[in-house]
């Protein structure tokens, strides 16, 4: 289920990403639009936790199967998201005429994608966020911490 929440009720994307990272979360991805026109800098996506993942060293078919397993649904992007990359090592399978130009490294995955447990899509233009999953409580400040010598 996707919930709409005003941005004023959420931590900043970088602040939330930092607290997730420092808390030891297995996977944290922060994707920010670059500066420019509002429609180009509209969304910031923060994803964390691993629902399922694909690390493919094999064929393009594995990536297609993973993609087809993503569920359609609500939110501004129409369903479940996956964050990751496709390496150049996969290019010859998609475009065989380029096989002579790409040297494959068998130790590096051809594709790596994570379907996260939790996603917050910050819509900076409309001032709201789409939340799938949970928002963690803000970290407690350690009052006993003493700095200096």
Image (cartoon, rainbow, N blue to C red):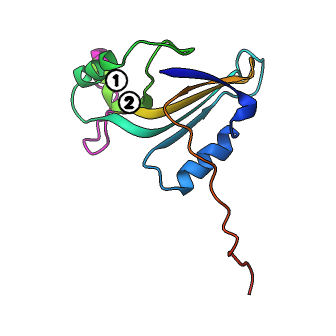
Regarding residue 98, the answer to whether it shows in the image is: no
Who's the residue at 67% across and 46% down the image?
A: 15
Q: Regarding mark 2 in the picture, which secondary structure is present there?
A: helix
Regarding residue 137, the answer to whether it shows in the image is: yes
Residue 21 on image: x %, y %: 54, 51
- 66 or 13, which lies in front? 13
Apparent side of residue 80 relative to residue 131 in the rendered image (left or right): left
Instruction: Name the magenta segment's main secondary structure.
Output: loop
Q: Is there a contact, CB below 8 Å, between mark 1 and mark 2? A: yes
Look at the image and tell me in which quarter the C terminus lies: bottom right
Q: How many marks?
A: 2
Q: Regarding mark 1 in the picture, which secondary structure is present there?
A: helix
Residue 130 on image: x %, y %: 59, 23
Is 102 included in the stretch rendered in magenta? yes
Who's the residue at 56% across and 56% down the image?
A: 22
Is 98 included in the stretch rendered in magenta? yes
Who's the residue at 45% across and 44% down the image?
A: 27
Span colored in magenta: 94-111
Residue 118 on image: x %, y %: 48, 34
Q: Which mark is residue 88?
A: 2
Q: Is residue 75 above or below residue 51?
A: above
- 131 or 18, which lies in front? 131
Circle 2 crowding by C-alpha within 10 Å: few under 14, some 14–19, many from 20: some
From mark 1 to mark 2, how far is it between C-alphas? Answer: 5 Å
Q: Which mark is residue 91?
A: 1
Q: Quadrant of residue 16?
A: top right
């Amino acid at each position: 289920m996707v919930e709409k929440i005003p941005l004023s009720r959420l931590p900043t994307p970088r602040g939330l990403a930092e607290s997730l990272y420092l808390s030891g979360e297995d996977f944290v991805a922060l994707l920010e639009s670059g500066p420019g026109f509002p429609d180009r800098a509209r969304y910031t996506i923060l994803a964390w936790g691993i629902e399922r993942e694909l690390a493919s060293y094999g064929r393009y078919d594995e990536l297609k199967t993973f993609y087809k397993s993503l569920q359609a649904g609500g939110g501004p992007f129409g369903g479940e998201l996956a964050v990751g990359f496709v390496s150049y090592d996969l290019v010859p399978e998609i475009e065989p005429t380029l096989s002579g130009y790409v040297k494959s490294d068998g130790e590096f995955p051809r594709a790596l994608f994570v379907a996260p447990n939790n996603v917050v899509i910050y819509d900076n233009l409309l001032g709201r966020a789409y939340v799938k999953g949970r928002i963690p409580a803000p970290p407690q400040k350690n009052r006993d911490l003493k700095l200096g010598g």
